[in-house]
Amino acid sequence: MNWIGIGALNMAIAVGLGAFGAHGLKGIADAQQLGWWHTATLYLLVHALGLLIAGLLIRLNYATQMTAWLLQIGVIIFAGSLYAMTLGAPRWFGAITPIGGVLMIAGWVWLAVTTFRSTTS
C-alpha cells in the first residue's frame, strides 16, 4: 500500500474540507456544528501528516502496515462521523466517533511498540 500517497491525498482533502468549513458553512451551520467540522479537519490534517511519516517509516522497515491502517481507518471514522453530523446526520451518529479515536490511539501506540522493537534488536 502506498501510504505516502494516501497521506498526501488526505492532506489535500483536509485543506479542501477546511476551506469549505470556513466559507461554505457560514450561515448554514451553528457554532457547535462548526466546532465539529473544525475538530474533524484538525484531526484529519494531523493524521494525514502522521500517515506520511508512517509511510516513510514503513519503507525504512521501522514500522508496519498495521500502524498506517489503524491511523487511516481511525481518522475516517472519527472525522467522517463529525463531518456527517455537521451535514445533518442524526446526533446519535456521534456514538461511533470514539471508535475512530481509539483506532488512532492504537495506531500511535502500535508505531511506538514497533519502533521500540526495531531499535532494541
Image (tube, rainbow, N blue to C red):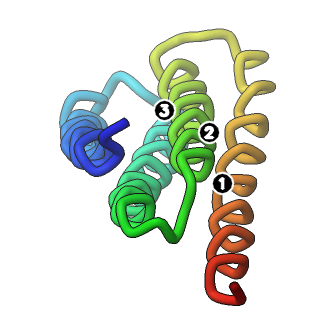
How many residues crowd mark 1 within 10 Å: few (<14), some (14–19), many (20+)?
many
Residue highlighted by disc 1: 107
Q: Nearer the viewer, residue 78 or 55?
A: 55
SS assignment at label 2: helix
Q: Position of residue 20 (x, y in %)?
A: 22, 34
Q: Amino acid at mark 3?
A: Asp
- Residue 31 visible to an observer of this rendering: yes
Quarter of the figure that contains the C terminus: bottom right
Asked which quadrant contains residue 50, the reply is bottom left
- Which residue extends farthest bottom? 120
Residue highlighted by disc 3: 30
Q: Amino acid at mark 1?
A: Gly
Question: In the displayed structure, would residue 30 be above or below residue 15?
Answer: above
SS assignment at label 3: loop
How many residues crowd mark 2 within 10 Å: few (<14), some (14–19), many (20+)?
many
Asked whether disc 3 touches disc 1, contact meaning CB atoms under 8 Å apart, the reply is no
Q: Position of residue 3 (x, y in %)?
A: 35, 45
Q: Nearer the viewer, residue 10 or 51?
A: 51
Numbered disc in front, either 1 or 2: 1
Q: CA distance from mark 2 to mark 3?
A: 26 Å
Asked whether disc 1 touches disc 2, contact meaning CB atoms under 8 Å apart, the reply is yes
Q: Amino acid at mark 2?
A: Gly
Q: Is residue 105 left or right of residue 33?
A: right
Q: Which mark is residue 74?
A: 2
Q: Nearer the viewer, residue 24 or 3?
A: 3
Quarter of the figure that contains the N terminus: top left
Q: CA distance from mark 3 to mark 1?
A: 32 Å
Q: Position of residue 93 (x, y in %)?
A: 71, 17
Q: Position of residue 60 (x, y in %)?
A: 38, 69
